[in-house]
Image: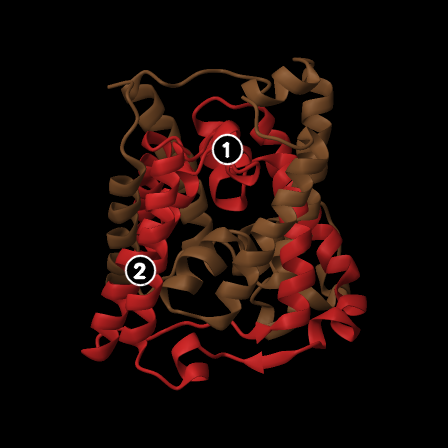
Chain colours: A red, B brown
Amino acid sequence: MMSLLYGLVSGILFGVLLQRAEVLRYDRQVGALRLMDMTIFKFMLTAIMVASVGIYFLKDMGLVSLSLKEAAFGAQIVGGTLFGIGWGLLGYCPGTAGGALGEGRLDAAWGLLGMLAGGAVYAAIYPALKATVLGLGKVGKVTLPQVMGVSHWVVIAAMAILFLAMFRLFEKKGL
Amino acid sequence: MKRSWNPYLAGALTGLLLVLSVAVAGQYFGASTTFARGAAAIEQTAGVDTSRYEYFSTKGGKYGPDSLPNWQLLFVVGIALGGLGASLASGTFEIKRVPDMWAARFGDRPLWRNLTAFAGGVVLIIGARLAGGCPSGHGLSGLSQLAVSGFVALAFFFGGGWVSARLLYGKGGER
């Protein structure tokens, strides 16, 4: 029960932040894919910078644990590309489509229906996928610092420097 | 209040929200699994025997109809409520059938926009389930944990989206 309440409250707060930063909008999402408007990347990459510091700080204190998804190159390359193609067509993602409907974008409702249909299709074709793409290139639940054999703080710092350089470029180009 | 919030600031607050969610509720952000679970629940309600589908019973029914309601469903519903509340409070709620960018290129007939949105939703969820996550799960949560899976998935989300947007809108980024 508490878990449901936590989900609702964090969803509402996330929805407010997404809406007020205009990240929910089709024009912003597709604008990023067309390299015209980097609003959604400014939002997302800043969130990642802050969260990576917070999560690893709390993990070092022994207060939280990671919940890693398995790296499977076949699944993530094929699935990632398919996701991207669908994302370009819809212009909303699974997290933002509901929020977009909330701010009155009626086309998002068709996207949500499509996603539910997609879930049914996925379940129907799962056995074929499991026998092929899903098994390819599995390397386990690993993090970049583990693979590189360096401290996670080195990777967090490098990532922050890269993102800040990207932000500088975005601002310079007026994106 | 119509003016949007700075995306860096809203992103930083989102990062803090994610850290808080992990620390308090033990939950990393994610959204796409809810649509597979939603499909399972709808099929079950419609009288379909969902146990026919291996996917819905795999991992102890993690994706099955009985996994709902859970944290993530409420999170996704919360985003919609947050989007609605924030847009109403800021005077940016607007019933829109076709996004401006789409209308400028393809006209303002809702039919084509809705069909494309539906098809995009189908493809995107198949991709997300294959990859094991969406820009929330792999992007925000994955990169914040420095997960190898997150970096690979996000690169291909964007690559696929770039191709898709380019096919729809052609070369060049004129507004």
Q: Quadrant of the N terminus of chain B?
A: top left
Query: Percent from the top left, x then y, of residue A13?
Result: 29, 41
* Left or right, residue B25 beside residue B78: left
The residue that appears at 52% across and 33% down in the rendered structure is A31
Query: Percent from the top left, x then y, of residue A142?
Result: 47, 79
Disc 1 residue type (three-letter): Met
Query: Callout 1: residue from which chain?
Result: A
The residue that appears at 58% across and 63% down in the rendered structure is B132
Residue at image mark 2 = A161
Q: Residue furthest top?
A: B108
Can marks 2 and 1 be said to lie on one chain?
Answer: yes
Residue B21 in view here? no
Q: Nearer the viewer, residue A91 or B160?
A: B160
Query: Percent from the top left, x then y, of residue B57?
Result: 65, 69
Compared to residue B85, the image places residue B68 above or below, namely: below
Would you identify the image quadrant in which residue B87 lies?
Answer: top left
Disc 2 residue type (three-letter): Ile
* Left or right, residue B37 beside residue B113: left
Cα gap from disc 2 to disc 1, whole angstroms: 23 Å
Compared to residue B33, the image places residue A130 above or below, namely: below
Q: Which mark is residue A36?
A: 1
The residue that appears at 33% across and 67% down in the rendered structure is A158
Badge 1 crowding class, 10 Å Cα cut-off, few under 14, some 14 to 19, many 20 or more, is many
Q: Tags 2 and 1 in contact by the CB under 8 Å rule?
A: no
